[in-house]
Every structure is written in structure tokens, then in C-alpha cells.
Image (spheres, rainbow, N blue to C red):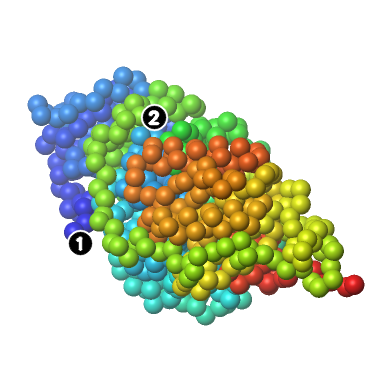
Amino acid sequence: MTHSTFPSWPDVASQLIETAAGRAPADTVIRNGKWVNVHTREVLDGHDIAIRAGRIAYVGPDASYCTGPDTQVIEAEGRYMVPGLCDAHMHIESGMLTPAEFARAVIPHGTTSMFTDPHEIANVLGLEGVRLMHDEALLQPINIYTQMPSCAPSAPGLETTGYEISAEDVAEAMTWPGIIGLGEMMNFPGVANADPKMLAEIAATQRAGKTVGGHYASPDLGPDFAAYVAGGPADDHEGTCEADAIARMRQGMRAMVRLGSAWYDVEAQITAITEKGLDPRNFILCTDDCHSGTLVNDGHMNRVVRHAIDCGCDPLIALQMATINTATHFGLEREIGSLTPGRRADVILTSDLSSLPIELVIARGQIVAEAGSIKVDCPHLDWPDAARGTVHLGHELSATDFELAAPEGANAVTANVIGVVENQAPTKALKAELPVKDGLVEGVGDVCQIALVERHQATGGVTNAFVSGFGYQGKMAMASTVAHDSHHMIVVGTDRAQMALAANRLAEVGGGITLYRDGEELALVELPIAGLMSDRPASEVAAKAQKLVEAMQDCGCRLNNAYMQHSLLALVVIPELRISDLGLVDVRTFKKIPVIEPFNE
């Protein structure tokens, strides 16, 4: 297919030079603004920016000498001129949107560059899914760089995916125009133990001169962490405390610190900068996972920068963490991340650096949003049928598929239970005494059932276990085909019949999220593309997602953004306890454990 590619610097260098020298007029001049220089951490009043061929030709106190009769003049009127914001690590699929609709949602918030890891779709559709995401990304009016997913499955032997990513796939993807590096290397035990496949993927990336993304989701900062760093990952976003950020930066990694819809990891780690006084150049802000409701109602990287400032960070340092630090990490400091000659003309106008209202957004020299309204088209791919029919259950499910038999003669059992932690990705490994009724183990109190339903190969397999923390009441069930990272179907409920209804409904609509109570569907978010994404606008998806939030609350759930916790309960690379199609997994040891502890009469 034909990509809408942005001209490289060599293609337009002579034009930039001619304009900077005053021998040819600029296409656009932004006049009389406060230049936020992220290289020197200065704000310089009374400056102009001259733009030619989508790039910056000149920044200085007076661009009148390169302003011609046909030059578009934008009056900054003393507002701050800030580089377009960069999201260093994120998954577009978490927004439940296609790349085009995600771009449409975030452009008005000032995001002009994203570094995306489409490992969600890789688990469902393999390399072809990655290619579709990559191709649609290249059509957008902003910079969407794609990281080739590294781990599908994320933990070999502990889960089964729709497709597996190989080292050969990684090597092929490194030749694609929009691939910027290797996606988060989640199999951290594999790297630490010199797994040949993981090292082959890293080697293919480094031979291509690209960046290896990290994911070290363990509190152990001893030899295993040292071995992981030695293996090549250049960054990590799984830190949750100050010591994590410090350890990563001291070892030469970039600490990527996230504020997503449910991950609140900035406040605990930014003290490494604000209190310990460490050099902030290796500290990078990102979102990781943002659903559509957050994007529509709260923002994107502008929300993260504001939050960092609210946590005590100097506004200019916070902006560096979302612009030049990110660009430098990916080897793109000559392309993006600052308002300096030669760079892509990605500019935000804002009247306040702390509250950061996004008043005008320019990307590649073109006005793309103003006062919260998008001004450009975000082109879609024609997604093939193969990407839309991905939910295969094998048979219609019934309540009996969700039964968990007790040991013979038991009146009660001790169960291993997944404990949800609000606003964090990790879970707790809990134990609970559960009653037995008619030979079946029952949830009680805050402990309800969870099931992982196989949906890629139509095996009919259902893995049953227990989860605590959602606070559900009454007869209800919620099902989702977004189930990081293998993306089977997660069903959580207090009633087995409702669980069957919810699961069968998602098979009927081709994927998404639904919630049933007493036989009635209270909410449905259709996600027909790979069971992960809608091709509808973010506002529509957000409205349906909000109904889901309200339905969860009506069923007793009070957790913040509980859906994100729900969707990560099968992520077998983040401690402590997870569910997969192969059983219950203790991620502290990377071993399967029984749901029911051995029973002695």
C-alpha cells in the first residue's frame, strides 16, 4: 500500500537553509511567543518560529525577514510555544480504538508523537496484525512510531496465544519504514537466563540500530535485575516506587514512568528528581494504557505532564520528560522533541505552563487542532475480514463450564485467590476459605469467580479460579475479549449462568466487553477488530465505556478504573498471581499452582 510519509531532512534541507538565510519565505510564521527551549530549560520571551516544508527553519526574536506575502502568520500573542508532546510507551489497543481514531482523540490534547507497541493485536493476529497497525499509523498527520512486539506469548509455557512472534518476524519488521525498535521485553526471566530466542530478537533489533524496550516487573533489584540490564533492554516502565526509578537510571536505563487510566506510578517515583535531585534527563513520562474515557474526558500526555507538575516537578523539567528526553532515547532528537531548526514543526501554544491548556496544536507545520477541536482528517485502513472474526469458542457455553469441583468429601476448601490492587498493575496472591455446595466450590463475600475462556483456536477450554477486590454483589458477570496479553476472554462473576450469558454474547458480536445482571445486559462495548478495537470515534466508544463503568458500580464495584484491572488479570508477566488458559500462575516463581490447596479429610 502507499504510505503518507513525511519528507526527510535531506529532502528539504535546501529549502530550510534558504528560508533561514532570508532568501525564501517561510510557509508559516508563529509570531511573538514565549519560546520554551527544552535543550537549555529556558523560557525566552518575544520569539518567532519560521516553518518551511513542515519543519522549523528558524527560531529567534524576529522572523519578519523570512516572512513573505503568502506566509501564513499565527499570532502567539505572548503565549508559550511548547514542543508537541511525546508518549514514550503505550498500547493503542488499550484505548479500544484504531490508530486513526486514537490519533483523532489525542491530537487536541497536544500529543504529536507516540511510540506504540501493538503486542495486543500481535497475540491475536500475529505479524499481519502488527503490519495493519503499522500501516494505519503511517497514514496519520502526527508521528506514530511502531515498536515490533517481542513477546507473544509473553511467558512461553504458561499461556497459549493466537499467534507466536519469532525472531525471524522481528528481523523482518526491522526493515519496515515505521518500526522504531523492539517492544517491551516482558519475558524478563528469559532475558536474565539468556534464552536464545529472546537474545536473538534483541540482537536483530540492535543490528538494525534500533531501541530495545524493557519490562522488568519484579521488585528484585539484585542479580536478576543486573542480568536483565546486561541483556540489552534500554528502558523500563514497570517501576512503582522511588527505588525502582533510581535503580534503572543508575544502571543506564531510562526510567519510563506512567500515568495511565489505572496506573498511578508518577507520584511515587518522581521524588527521585524532586527530592533526591537526580539528573532528570533519563526520566521519561508515558501513559502505557489509556482507555477512551480518559482520552475524551481527561486528556493524554498533557494530563501526565500536569500530574507531574502537581507532584512537585518543575514545569520545564516535566516538559523535558515528555519531549526531548523521549526523542533522545529513541535516537530522534534531530527529528522531534524540541523547537529548533531542522526538527518537525510540532508546536503547542498554551497560556500557562502549569495547567497546560492546549489552545493550538501544530503538527508537521499544519494546524491540526484548536481549542479542543480537531482540524484534520485521520485516514483509516480498510480492515480485512480476517481481522474482524476472531472470537472462536468451539461451543455455546453454559453454567456447567464455569463449575469448579471440590475434592470429594470437602465441606470447605482453601483456595488461592487473585487479589486486585487499586490503581496498580500488580496483584496480590491471597488465600481464602471457601464453602462447598453440591460438590462445587462457591465464592463468598468479596471473592467471586474468574474464568479464562479460550477464544483463538476454538478448543472450548475454560480455566476457572477466584478473584477478590471488585466488590461485586448480586447475580452478575462481566466478560471481556481484552485480556492482556494473550487476549482470550476473561469472565468475572458471582453467578455461573450470568458468566455463560456474557461469554456467549461476546462470541455473537465478535468481541468486546459486556456486563450482565439477572439475565439482563446492562452494558456492551463492541470491539469487532481483533476483539480489541472499535473503528468508531473515541467519543462513541467512551460513551459506551462510561455505561460499562456505571454498570460495574451498580453491581457494587467501587475501584477506580476497575476495567483496567479486569483486563490485566491474565497478564502472566506481572506478579503476583494471574490466570491463563493453562491454569493459575504464580508470577513470583513463574510456575502454575493449584486453585484449590490439597485437601486432607
Specify the amino acid type for callout 1. Met
Q: Where's residue 231, x and y in %?
A: 55, 70
Q: Residue at 35% of width from left, 60% of height from top? A: 388
Q: Where's residue 574, x and y in %?
A: 62, 60
Asked whether 131 or 581 is in front, the reply is: 581
In which quarter of the view is residue 38 placed? top left
Badge number at residue 1: 1
Q: Is residue 404 above or below residue 167?
A: above
Residue assigned mark 2: 358
In which quarter of the view is residue 64 placed? top left
Q: Residue at 14% of width from left, 41% of height from top? A: 18
Q: Is residue 420 found left or right of 478 in the rendered image? A: right
Q: Is mark 2 on a helix, strand or loop?
A: loop
In which quarter of the view is residue 364 placed? top left
Asked whether 376 or 485 is in front, the reply is: 485
Q: Which of marks 1 and 2 is in front?
A: 1
Specify the amino acid type for callout 2. Ile
Q: Where's residue 553, x and y in %?
A: 61, 38
- Residue at the extreme right: 601
- Residue at the extreme top: 77
Asked whether 507 or 316 is in front, the reply is: 507
- Badge 1 crowding class, 10 Å Cα cut-off, few under 14, some 14 to 19, many 20 or more, is few
